[in-house]
Amino acid sequence: KNPASLDWKLSDYKAITNSSNYKDPPAYIAKKLQRLTIKGQSSPLKAQAGFDSIKGVNFKKGQQWYKDYYVLTRKTLLKDFENLKALKINTLKHYGPSVYDENVLSISSEFGLKTMYSFWINGSINFVTDTLTLLKLEKDILKTVKTHKNRDNIISWNIGNDVLAQLDHYYNKPVLLHQQFAYTKWLDRLLSKIKIEDPSRPVSIDISTELGAQSRASFLVKYLQFDAFGII
């Protein structure tokens, strides 16, 4: 006999909005996720971005500029990028928006370095109730895409952090499922708007190698439209 188990699947997605745990959740999370039908396995955008030829590095310097003494001045970046070119690095993964965007993007272009521009999504956000936080985050991301989409050295946009995995550290079921569902709905809307603003570039989503990676990857592929995974 099969061992007894609990079925945590949502029989009615509106149960999230009716739950006493949440006050005034966004209306979009009550709508059922639409499963995608994928035709073919190749992506022309991935080929266009040259993902197969990337020799890259996470360029994390200056991320917490307000509490360290590493300033990404032109002099500093010239030295850094010279060293990277000497190592045959051809691509940076840069996190933004940042006060150093202009310096990093402009000077890396001078060195012929490509940039994968990444947006860090904090896994501690309450994706059901923190609507103002999510709205500001979405606006900041879309504004950044609009600002930098004409830079030739940006080859793709990236959604940083494996949020589905991070949520597992903050919530237990069934609230965990509510949070993962709300995050996926929010991300679906964001990806669609990024593609509208800049249809020429691929968008990748980071996924960690911790337990459950295959399940999370299958879930994302099933419900979201994006071009590649970034393994972290």
Image: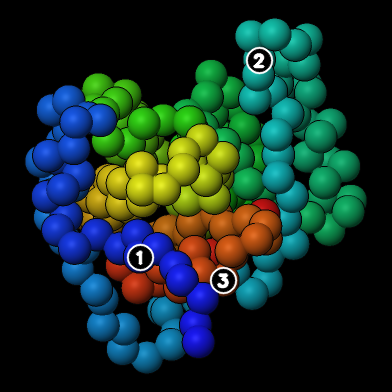
- The quadrant of the picture occupied by the C terminus is bottom right
Along the line of sight, the residue nearer the viewer: 191 or 99: 191
Label 1: few (<14), some or many (≥20) within 10 Å? few
Q: Position of residue 210 (x, y in %)?
A: 67, 57
Q: Nearer the viewer, mark 1 or mark 3?
A: 1
Q: Relative to 95, is 204 on the left or the right?
A: left
Quarter occupied by residue 161: top right
Q: Position of residue 18 (x, y in %)?
A: 12, 39
Along the line of sight, the residue nearer the viewer: 125 or 116: 125
**Residue at 49 percent of width and 57 percent of height:** 205
Q: Amino acid at mark 2?
A: Trp
Number of numbered callouts drawn: 3
**Residue at 16 percent of width and 55 percent of height:** 13
Q: Relative to 204, is 79 on the left or the right?
A: right
Q: How far apart are the alpha carbons under marks 1 and 2?
A: 46 Å
Evaluate whether residue 183 shows in this view. Answer: no
Label 3: few (<14), some or many (≥20) within 10 Å? few
At mark 1, the secondary structure is loop
Are the residues flagged by discs 2 and 3 in contact, CB closer than 8 Å? no
Q: Position of residue 52 (x, y in %)?
A: 64, 74
Name the residue beneath numbered marker 3: 214
Q: How far apart are the alpha carbons under marks 2 and 3?
A: 35 Å
Q: Which mark is residue 7?
A: 1
**Residue at 44 percent of width and 85 percent of height:** 42
Q: Position of residue 84 (x, y in %)?
A: 82, 46
Q: Residue furthest front?
A: 1
Q: Which mark is residue 164?
A: none
Q: Relative to 153, is 140 on the left or the right?
A: left
Along the line of sight, the residue nearer the viewer: 21 or 104: 21
Q: Amino acid at mark 3?
A: Gln
At mark 3, the secondary structure is helix
Q: Which mark is residue 65?
A: 2
